[in-house]
Amino acid sequence: DAKTTQPPSMDCAEGRAANLPCNHSTISGNEYVYWYRQIHSQGPQYIIHGLKNNETNEMASLIITEDRKSSTLILPHATLRDTAVYYCIVRLPINTGTASKLTFGTGTRLQVTL
Amino acid sequence: DVKVTQSSRYLVKRTGEKVFLECVQDMDHENMFWYRQDPGLGLRLIYFSYDVKMKEKGDIPEGYSVSREKKERFSLILESASTNQTSMYLCASSLARNSNQPQHFGDGTRLSIL
């Protein structure tokens, strides 16, 4: 799986958009970008994933650059409940053997403030 | 929405006890996983299963076993609990073996072995 780089922390005012960047310059052509978040003492929560097109769901939008070397997760109107550690993962769509495991990096700690 | 339910949020057991952690998913997913998460060590895969009565070892299977008698249920067993098995245990499921669909996690079981 390609390595990802994320800023260790970010702040965002409640009601504003939170834009979380992720660098994955070594991504290969068939690797997907996945975003998860983990609120303290809870299990990781899946947010969104994509291959090359931008994606949107009820939680967030995912913008992937044309060269696929970076992406941005956008929470359009951040709330206090969005305070969490956000993980960007790049991996193949294969669930065979131990390649099926998810590996989280250190992620970005997003603090949403009043 | 995908629902992965773990039987307990918090559990306290004694050294040497046999401990059962239960996980149920309601989306007819083929794949199920058990991870443990420890500070500084990230997620580590213990066991996973692609089908009923099928199991494969992950990266740290020692001291654990699993059971998958029904598609929706995947149990993790600590044969003789030890203090170094104190951890957050996370169950996850995903749709199929070779699919880009994500893993979905339960809320976790925080297990303390005294």
Image: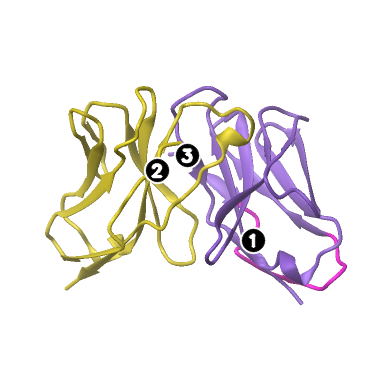
Chain colours: A yellow, B purple
Asked whether residue B87 is in view, the answer is: yes
Q: Which residue is mark 2?
A: A3
Q: Which residues are magenta?
A: B6-18
User: On what subunit does the disc labeled 2 rest?
Assistant: A
The N terminus of chain B lies in which quarter of the figure?
Answer: top left
Where B42 falls versus A56 (above or below)?
below
Does the magenta stretch mainly form a helix, a strand or a loop?
A: loop
Give the image location of residue B35, x and y in percent. 62, 50
Q: Does mark 3 fall on the same chain as mark 2?
A: no
* Gap between marks 1 and 2 measured at Cα: 34 Å
* Gap between marks 2 and 3 measured at Cα: 28 Å
Q: Which mark is residue B80?
A: none
Q: Secondary structure at mark 1?
A: loop
Q: Which residue is mark 3?
A: B2
Q: Identity of the amino acid at label 3?
A: Val
B32 relative to B68 in the view: left or right: left
Residue at 39% x, 28% y is A31
Q: Which mark is residue B8?
A: 1
Is B8 colored magenta in this rendering? yes
Q: Identity of the amino acid at label 2?
A: Lys
Is B40 colored magenta in this rendering? no
* Gap between marks 3 and 1 measured at Cα: 18 Å
Q: Residues within 10 Å of mark 3 (few under 14, many from 20)?
A: some
Asked whether residue A61 is in view, the answer is: no
Dividing the picture into quadrants, the one containing residue A25 is: top left
